[in-house]
Amino acid sequence: MPWTIPNLLSSSRLILAPILVFLAWKGMDRVFLVLFTISLVTDILDGKIARWLHQQSELGARLDSWADFATYMTTPLCAYWLRPELVATEAPFFWAVVASYTVPVAIGFLKFRSLTSYHTRGAVISAYALGGASIVLFAGGPVWPFRIAAYVLVLAEIEEIAITLVLREPVTNVKTLGRALALRRG
């Protein structure tokens, strides 16, 4: 059944992405922050609920990855509109985050002609770190959590690139590079 609770949560993130862009473009920072936070919380909940209800699926993993992609690709644009001074002062970290999301996706598309859906431990940790740091930034808080999260993200995405290079075919839910190496061996 494709319309499970976890898949509906992931779908809500796909729907929220353009709404967040619109809100940022209009400068509606408070509403943006509330919906952005809801989007990040549903990202946490979809996987947990899928495991709890035994509703994990290939479709769910891919839907989650597409929702992540939509959120991560629209957030920099939202930051540019809502916090342009932050984008300017934190440019090296900002662009490191953008590159960390785009380069592994590009490599995955080049190799497999599809979006990868590894859901590595590093990606989960970096998503929590960057999600929390982004909420803090959009709320006007300090930048140091964002800087730390950027480093964590870069390391996680290096692992995702390595997994893509190791695998012979696309596989979902590869938690570590070690698991990818085991899959390659066979």
Image (cartoon, rainbow, N blue to C red):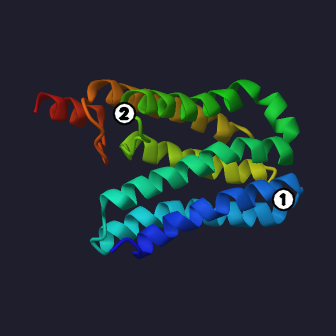
Question: Residue visible at 30% across and 43% down?
Answer: 175
- Between 178 and 23, the residue placed more toward the observer is 23
Earlier in the chain: of badge 2 and badge 1, it is: 1
Seen in the image, is 104 located left or right of residue 184?
right
Check disc 2 and give the amino acid type. Answer: Phe
Relative image position of residue 68 (x, y in whole percent):
53, 51
Tag 2–tag 1 contact (CB < 8 Å): no
Q: Which mark is residue 29?
A: 1
Mark 1: few/some/many CA within 10 Å (<14, 14-19, 20+): many
Mark 2: few/some/many CA within 10 Å (<14, 14-19, 20+): some
When the figure is inspected, residue 155 is found, relative to residue 71, above or below; the finding is above
Tell me the quadrant of the picture where the N terminus can be found: bottom left
Q: Which residue is mark 2?
A: 112
Seen in the image, is 176 located left or right of residue 92?
left
User: Which residue sits furthest left?
Assistant: 186
Of helix, strand and loop, which one carries label 1? helix
Q: Nearer the viewer, mark 2 or mark 1?
A: 2
